[in-house]
Amino acid sequence: MGVIMRLGALGLGAVTLAAAVGLRAQDAPGGGPSAVEVSAEGRQVYEQICQACHMADAMGGGGAGAKIPALAGNPRLADKDYGTIILLKGRGGMPWFSDILTPEQMAAVLTYVRGHFNDYKDPVTLADVERVNVASPPVPDCNCTQ
Ligand code: HEC
């Protein structure tokens, strides 16, 4: 319920939310997905959720005072925990996704964003997401919006 209200307030419609829930339901039971599946799922999550704000080309933007950073060519993503922390905890106008995406989906979408829109080929794994979640570090300082 809180999730629906929060995303609604952020301008995401029911279609996106339904897509998010559908993605969760599609999760392969047991076992880790293959590399190919990870990349397909990562793209799917990106296109159905992240792209609404970060745009299809991941160049960000946003009108009416919204400042959405580019994820393409973004050196902050060289640190593979950087996006994980933001997905887990949110920051500023970026909602957290820990209650919408599974850890597998967070790993998949970050692997996609880092590999497809940047040249960081090492995957973000489920273990990475879980490690960051357990460590629960403070959100790092970022000059991107100031
Ligand atoms: C509702 C709009 C919205 C959606 C949906 C969204 N983002 Fe964001 N994102 C933002 C905003 C706004 C920021 C800037 C946050 C800040 O620093 O204040 C941001 C920042 C980020 C950053 C940090 C960029 C930087 O240079 O510091 C990453 C990484 C990121 N988003 C990834 C994602 C991913 C992956 C998804 C999809 C699962 C996603 N975002 C979905 C709005 C959104």
Image (cartoon, rainbow, N blue to C red):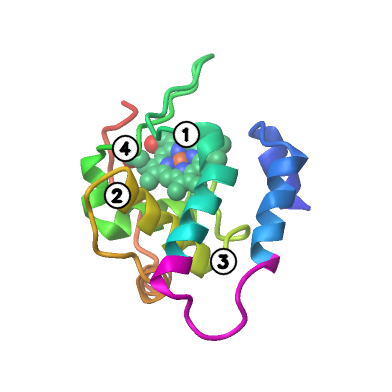
Is 35 magenta? The answer is yes
Q: Quadrant of residue 125?
A: bottom left
Q: Is residue 56 left or right of residue 17?
A: left
Please tell me the numbered disc located at residue 102.
3
- Categorize mark 4 by other alpha carbons within 10 Å: few (<14), some (14-19), many (20+): some
User: What amino acid is at disc 3?
Assistant: Thr
**Residue 124 x %, y %:** 34, 65
Is label 2 in a helix, a strand or a loop? Answer: loop
**First of labels 3, 4 by sequence position:** 4
Nearer to us in this view, 24 or 28: 28
Nearer to us in this view, 134 or 123: 123
Q: Answer whether residue 91 is visible to the viewer in this image.
A: no
Q: Which residue is mark 1?
A: 56
Magenta region: which residues? Answer: 25-37
**Residue 108 x %, y %:** 44, 62
User: What amino acid is at disc 1?
Assistant: Ala
Depth check, mark 2 against mark 1: the one in front is: 1
Depth check, mark 3 against mark 1: the one in front is: 1
Q: Which residue is mark 2?
A: 140
**First of labels 3, 1 by sequence position:** 1
Residue at position x 52%, y 33% from top? 53
